[in-house]
Image (cartoon, grey):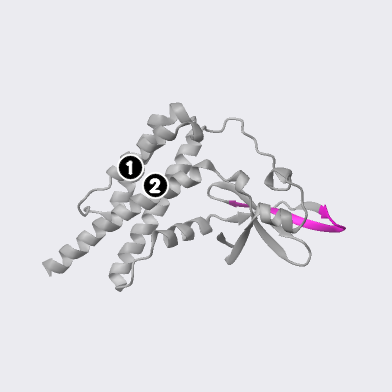
């Protein structure tokens, strides 16, 4: 996995590979520095059917014909997503702030994709892929913790920081004194990450199809 950290592209090593390479125990990972507190967390894994309803409703909200306003469309989709999350929240148990945060992220990616579409039309450039737009958004949310954890290992003192992005703490930055390793800890992957990626990918694919239709209408109209 690649992420930009402090504006620099970084390859993240899977935690299990790093443990084997450095003779570390299975307990070495994010939880060794920041134990996970599940108090009050939503139960997204227990609402797969309901999340499928949300997915279907949001995708269906993308019109088959070009909208009067592309940015307006992204705002409408945000509202649909918000409404659908509220409807199923009795099953998921998200806090209000968590719903608002998810809706905000959804809207940011949709708006970034639409903006990229418009810029591509104006500059007669290839349309960026969803993966490029999504990665750029995710990279902008990535940051290192201010707190530094000391970890003694084989006579050396490692300095460890947590890596966080839009979905929460997801990895470690480990300075061994000789080099810095960036680690992805799959044990702390947010369950919502896969859902959001798949939803946004399908929504933007449908938006792109509608945009292609609009481009053809412009060409034929000219």
The residue nearer to you, when weighing 45 against 36, is 45
- Estimate the x, y position of residue 173 in percent, counting from the top left: 68, 57
Q: Residue at x 48, y 46 (%)?
A: 194
Q: Give the magenta part as a residue range.
A: 152-164
Give the mark, 2 or 1, whose residue is nearer the N terminus.
Answer: 1
Q: Residue at x 29, y 70 (%)?
A: 122
> Which secondary structure class fits the magenta region best?
strand
Q: Is residue 95 visible?
A: no
The residue beneath circle 1 is 58
Label 1 SS: helix
Label 2 SS: helix
- Estimate the x, y position of residue 153 in percent, counting from the top left: 82, 55
Question: Given the current orientation, which residue lies at the most extreme top position?
Answer: 90
Q: Quadrant of the C terminus?
A: bottom left
Asked if residue 192 lies left or right of residue 22, the reply is left
- Estimate the x, y position of residue 171 in percent, counting from the top left: 63, 52
Label 2, label 1: how far apart the Cα atoms are: 8 Å
Please tell me whether residue 87 is drawn above or below residue 204 in the rendered image. above
Q: Is residue 115 visible?
A: yes
Please tell me whether residue 92 is drawn above or below residue 29 in the rendered image. above
Q: Quadrant of the N terminus?
A: bottom right
- Residue 166 highlighted magenta (yes or no): no
Q: Residue at x 29, y 53 (%)?
A: 206
Numbered circle sitting on residue 199: 2
Please tell me whether residue 83 is drawn above or below residue 147 in the rendered image. above
Question: Given the current orientation, which residue lies at the most extreme front position?
Answer: 20
Neighbour tally class for label 2: few under 14, some 14-19, many 20 plus, Cα within 10 Å: many
Neighbour tally class for label 1: few under 14, some 14-19, many 20 plus, Cα within 10 Å: many
């Amino acid at each position: 996995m690649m992420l930009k950290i402090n504006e620099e592209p970084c390859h993240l090593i899977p935690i299990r590979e790093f443990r084997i390479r450095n003779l570390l125990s299975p307990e070495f990972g994010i939880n060794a520095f920041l134990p996970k507190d599940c108090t009050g967390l939503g139960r997204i894994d227990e609402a797969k059917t309901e999340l499928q309803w949300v997915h279907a409703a949001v995708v269906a909200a993308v019109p088959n014909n070009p909208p009067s306003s592309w940015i307006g469309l992204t705002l409408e989709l945000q509202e649909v997503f918000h409404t659908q999350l509220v409807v199923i929240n009795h099953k998921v148990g998200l806090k209000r702030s968590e719903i608002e945060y998810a809706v905000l992220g959804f809207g940011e990616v949709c708006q970034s994709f639409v903006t990229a579409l418009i810029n591509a039309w104006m500059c007669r450039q290839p349309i960026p892929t969803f993966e490029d737009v999504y990665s750029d958004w995710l990279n902008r949310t990535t940051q290192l913790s201010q707190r530094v954890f000391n970890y003694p290992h084989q006579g050396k003192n490692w300095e460890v920081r947590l890596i966080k992005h839009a979905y929460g703490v997801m990895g470690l930055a480990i300075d061994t004194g000789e080099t810095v390793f960036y680690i992805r800890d799959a044990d702390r992957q947010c369950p919502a990450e896969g859902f959001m990626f798949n939803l946004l990918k399908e929504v933007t694919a449908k938006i792109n199809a509608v945009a292609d239709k609009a481009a053809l209408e412009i060409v034929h109209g000219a």
